[in-house]
Amino acid sequence: MRLAAGTAVIARGFTWLRIEPPIESFVPEALAIVAGVLLLAGLWTPVVGSMVAVLGCWKAVSQPGDPWADILLVTIGVALALLGPGAWSIDARLFGWKRIDIRDREH
């Protein structure tokens, strides 16, 4: 999920930079590209997932066109922020991979 979201964020960022050259769109799109690269690497995943969600909300509201791709990226960003990076990531190497075991309820 992290790799698909990172690739999609990078592709959308480069597409918007190519279409809209004004400086107003440069900063959010550059942030989106950096966030996509960090998602691909799995570094600072909860922070970057939140940043992708915020950037997606901003793009869905402020830019014309179809907002559904941005809403999908918001959903994936929130899911990554809540779930974490997974076992194969820089975060897992630096901080350890957390696993949550849910036990059965004992009566």
Image: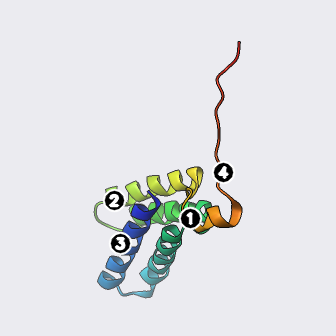
Q: CA distance from mark 4 to mark 3?
A: 31 Å
Sooner in the amino-acid sequence: mark 2 or mark 3: 3
Residue carrying label 3: 12
User: In the image, which is nearer the foreground, mark 1 or mark 2?
Assistant: 1
Q: Are marks 1 and 2 in contact (CB under 8 Å)?
A: no
Residue carrying label 4: 98
For this orientation, the residue located farthest to the top is: 107
Residue type, label 3 = Arg
Q: Is residue 34 left or right of residue 18?
A: right
Sooner in the amino-acid sequence: mark 1 or mark 2: 2
Q: CA distance from mark 2 to mark 3?
A: 9 Å
Which colour scheme appears in the figure?
Answer: rainbow
**Which SS class for mark 1?**
loop
User: In the image, which is nearer the foreground, mark 4 or mark 3?
Assistant: 4
Q: Nearer the viewer, residue 63 or 83?
A: 83
**Is the residue 20 above or below the residue 54 in the image?**
below
Label annotation for residue 89: 1
Sooner in the amino-acid sequence: mark 4 or mark 3: 3
Q: CA distance from mark 1 to mark 2?
A: 25 Å
Q: Nearer the viewer, residue 37 or 25?
A: 37
Sooner in the amino-acid sequence: mark 3 or mark 1: 3
Residue 86 placement (x, y as % from top left)? 55, 56
